[in-house]
Image (cartoon, grey):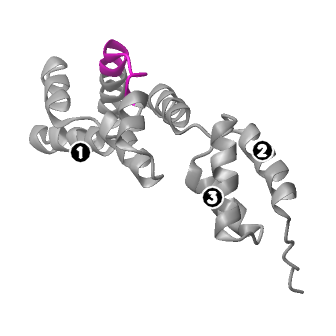
Amino acid sequence: MEQKKKYYTPKEALLKAAAYCAYQERTQQEVRTKLYSYGLEPDDVENLIVRLSEEKMIDEERYAQSYVRGKYGIKKWGRRKIVQGLKGKGISDYCIKQGLKEIDFDQYEQNLLNLLEKKARTEKEKNPFQRRQKLSYYLLSKGYENDLVQDALKSIGE
């Protein structure tokens, strides 16, 4: 059985969108998509986006900071992967720069070394060249910069 799509008035949609934004940080694009799913006209959607931004329900700089804290602090991602993720969500370069200020460089390097040591313990490759290459690929896939990866590999003697 096909589900009937519910349409909302702009006033109802504003309340729903406010609740949607209050639940967790959202990008303008996520909110825009949600509003279109409510069957609103493009003009109404843009007016609601502006209103939600003015009321600080949507703040892309705050979103970027929160995203960076989560990905670098919990998932241990590198800067390159974080930047790609933010660009994929349509965040402006200015907001990305502001978000990256959340990264403490000493903690960033510590994350890199911890990941390397953990991976080195589980890597079964015996050939030293291939082992080093596998460890390097792993860290690059986590979004760490090549020069930092090479320095980390030298520092633990891989």
Residue 46: mark:
3
> Residue at point 21% right, 39% down?
136
The first of marks 1 and 2 along the sequence is 2
32 shown above or below 26: below
Find residue 35 and report its horizontal and vertical position in percent: 71, 61
**Residue behind mark 2:** 18
Tell me the SS state at disc 1: helix
The reply to whether the C-beta atoms of the residues labelled 3 and 2 are less than 8 Å apart is no
Amino acid, disc 1: Tyr
Amino acid, disc 2: Ala
> Residue at point 51% right, 35% down?
67
Q: Quadrant of the C terminus?
A: top left
Q: Main secondary structure of the magenta part?
A: helix
User: Is residue 2 in the magenta section?
Assistant: no
Q: Quick one: label 2, few (<14), some, or many (20+) residues within 10 Å?
A: some
- Counting every numbered tag in the picture gives 3
Residue segment shown in magenta: 100-110
